[in-house]
Image (cartoon, helix red, strand yellow):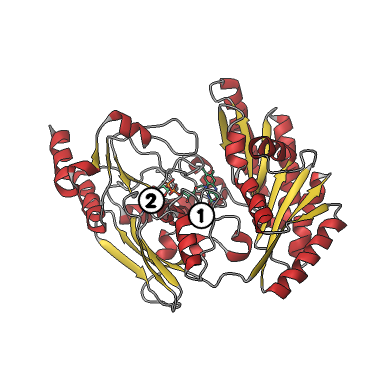
Amino acid sequence: MRDQALIKKFADILGVESVFTQESDLLTYSYDAAGLPGQAPWLALRPQTLEHLGRAVKVCHEEGLPLTVRGAGTNLSGGAIPRPDGVVLLTSALKRIIEINQADMYAVVEPGVVTAQLFAATLAHGLFYPPDPGSQAVSTLGGNVAENSGGLRGLKYGVTRDYVMGLSFFDSEGNLVHTGARTVKCVTGYNLAGLMVGSEGTLGVFGRIILKLIPPPAAAKAMVAVYERMQDASETVAAIIAARILPATLEFMDNFTIRTVEDYSRAGLPREAAALLLIEVDGHPAQVEEEAARVQEICRQHGARVQMAQDAAQRDKIWEARRAAIPALARLKPSIWLEDATVPRSQIPAMIAALTEIAAKCQLTIGTFGHAGDGNLHPTIVYDKRDPDQRQRVAAAVEAIFERALTLGGTLSGEHGLGLTKVRFLADEVGPATIAWSRRLKAALDPKGILNPGKAIGG
Ligand SMILES: Cc1cc2nc3c(=O)[nH]c(=O)nc-3n(C[C@H](O)[C@H](O)[C@H](O)COP(=O)(O)OP(=O)(O)OC[C@H]3O[C@@H](n4cnc5c(N)ncnc54)[C@H](O)[C@@H]3O)c2cc1C
């Protein structure tokens, strides 16, 4: 009875077409890209306006209903998996770019705007929004802010956090809270955006986002450095940074990933290479020429053969090949487990050596690629999760990866968040006092515990 009355209440507020109760619809929202077992929600709602989004949160609060916001569902740590007794709030109808301000260089967007669409719209206005997660063709800006997503340009341009100027979000009671401004500088009140970015939907529901834009680089040059020894590639990364050059992008692929991507995309990658670095420098044309030459020289000193992209089409091909890594690896076996443990970039050679060791010890195939310049690698285990023995070996490998990353001064997650998959390791990195403090904060802001329960800090 309560269920039917509640469904009617939501339908009266949002319109019956925005309320999903069919099992087939709910199954669609039961999982994300992390590969954990799915869990269908009790109900899914698709608010059409900011006001409706807030009213939906308010009803969830009144009724004590757990709620999980869902952008595109590309989360890689189980953060978008709902509770079976809860509600999924879809942001797919909230996809307006409200403003692109050329004079003051910012954009105001709704949370369901797709990342690549904002990028394209800003370029059309002569501006640039750098954060470019590999999922940018489908991921939403709400999801990017909730995860503090990075991307291929993170090394030089930073991550989502560096572009959030302001936020309007609904608190757990459905009140609209504003933080930040349309100004470059703003120290009014607490820096709530600093808290909300990366909060994985556990502290509030983003309704509007103000994002900083910058001038686009005038020139760019991309290249592929081909290595016969993996160690040489990882040492090149450290050498480029040590030479005080910050490429826009500095990506790594091991041999297994190269062959898998080549089979999938026929991008012309050298199948025999032990490793590749995919590098782009950008900026003023003169500086680009100089830095490209310098980077090329450093790669060669470390034994690489360097192929320069000759035009925009060749450059695009390089980045398409890199973005194909996850879908290509995902085709090989029924399951993949993709990690994003991150180390200080000087420790990249040690981390790559550790991954080779862990793969051999656990008798698993691990394809490694990722944002080497950020110290953020994505060791990806291909396996069959239906086999208990393989599952056990994957769990042992993941534990070993985290243990090694932390020993090297790194962190559990560079960009995918802790979600459900990594929460149990949190104490190893931050200790019990930090967890207790975080849970006290969460309890104060969300006393009923309805906002994406169990994610990011567990509890
Ligand atoms: C092929 C592939 C490549 C990827 N590459 C990268 C990469 O390079 N860098 C990177 O950082 N990540 C990457 N990811 C991970 C993922 O795409 C990002 O975490 C992305 O930001 C998630 O966006 P989404 O719209 O899919 O969010 P979802 O998966 O729907 O949600 C992610 C989290 O954000 C919360 N959330 C979503 N919208 C809101 C909102 N409006 N208010 C409050 N909380 C909200 C959700 O509850 C959930 O906890 C990749 C994923 C895939 C599948």
In this rendering, the answer to whether 151 lies above or below 68 is below
Q: Residue at x 68, y 29 (%)?
A: 364
In this rendering, the answer to whether 78 lies above or below 170 is above
Residue 295 or residue 353, whichever sits in front: 295
Q: Residue at x 65, y 62 (%)?
A: 248
Residue at which label 2 appears: 201
At which x and y percent is residue 54? 24, 55
Q: Residue at x 56, y 26 (%)?
A: 334
Decide if ligand 1 comes within 8 Å of the CB at mark 2: yes
Q: Residue at x 70, y 49 (%)?
A: 252
At which x and y percent is residue 234? 76, 51
Residue at which label 1 appears: 149
- Badge 1 marks a residue whose secondary structure is loop
Decide if ligand 1 comes within 8 Å of the CB at mark 1: yes
Of the two numbered discs 1 and 2 on the same chain, state the one appearing first in sequence.
1
At which x and y percent is residue 221? 70, 63
Instruction: Give the left or right position of residue 312, taking residue 175 as reference.
Output: right
Q: How busy is the neighbourhood of tag 1: few (under 14 within 10 Å), some, or many (20 plus)? A: many
Q: How busy is the neighbourhood of tag 2: few (under 14 within 10 Å), some, or many (20 plus)? A: many
Quarter of the image where the C terminus is located: top left
